[in-house]
Amino acid sequence: MQISSHADKISRLLSLRDRLDPLQDFELWYWTCLTAGTNIWNATLHATGLTSGDRAFSTIPGVHVVPQGDGGWRRELRGPGDVSHVGWPAIPGDMPEPVQRLEAALHALEAHRDPCLRGDRQPIQAIVDDCDHAMSQAIGIYLALVRPEASP
Amino acid sequence: MSPEHHRDKARRIEASLAKLTDEDWEIRIEAAMLAGTHWVNFVLHRVGASAIAEDMVHASMCMVSVLRKYRLAEPELIAALEEIEELRPLHVRGDMDGGPQAADRALDLLGAIGKRARALA
């Protein structure tokens, strides 16, 4: 997907994140962070030339949903483009140091996904703080590499 | 996860949905997926189609033979969850037109899933 579409999503998702209570609404607050983070990841990979910004939407690794001229869509086998989660799939090639830091921050965020959303782990302030820290790192790198001219 | 824990998670997500607007279509669809999956697991556990240790994460990621079993047990429920999941690449990860309308549809489907689950609650 083009960087402009990722940027639109990031902006709206970060706005929503501010309207949700991190503990009371943890599940959707966390998922909003996660979704914004994945868009930051894809936009950064496109901006640094590591993946294609073609208008092809991620599903599982190697399969994208591609809009068609008639308004429909179809699934296609494709190479590196948008991913659904950081690391799924791993990105081939040498990543610049800031992109490596972004990847590490998003992996730290993802680590809370299954235990908190699909398991028995109760959200606590320390988890919220951990997610906030990861998001701060991710947003900082996004602003530096993709959107130096504007806040998200 | 126990049926009660799935129910509680689904209810928490549904309560948070009240803070979202039409402009938040990605997370409205994701909320339908998340809460819908918890409700489906709740039902599958309650009717004995899956063990407590056998939670479905996504219908689209299920082993074919297992998904076939779930469809036999709760065909309408699984069809509704699959329809929600089909909206995700188009409107959550993609930028197809009609995001707010897709989110409305996802929440209608969540409503149907929740109605079936609440009948067993």
Image (cartoon, coloured by chain):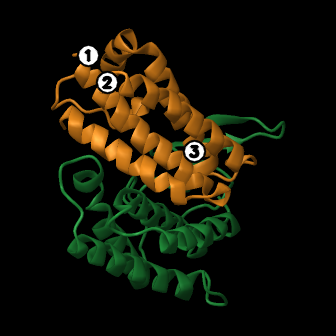
Chain colours: A green, B orange
Earlier along the polypeptide chain: callout 1 or callout 3?
1
Counting from the top left corner in percent of width and height, residue B13 is at: 40, 50
The residue located at (57%, 44%) in the rendering is B89
From the viewer's perspective, is A38 left or right of A53?
Answer: left
Q: Within 10 angstroms of label 1, few (less than 14), some, or many (20 or more) residues?
A: few
| Discs 2 and 1 carry the same chain letter | yes
Q: Is residue A38 above or below residue B14?
A: below
The residue located at (37%, 44%) in the rendering is B11
Residue furthest toward the right?
A70
Q: Is residue A118 above or below residue A11?
A: above
Whether tag 2 and tag 1 are in contact, CB under 8 A, the answer is yes
Residue type, numbered disc 2: Val
Work out which quarter of the rendered image holds the C terminus of chain B and state it.
top left
Question: Pointer 3 indicates a residue of which chain?
Answer: B
Name the residue that disc number 1 marks.
B47
Q: CA distance from mark 2 to mark 3?
A: 26 Å
Residue B43 is labelled as 2
Nearest the eye: A146 or A28: A28
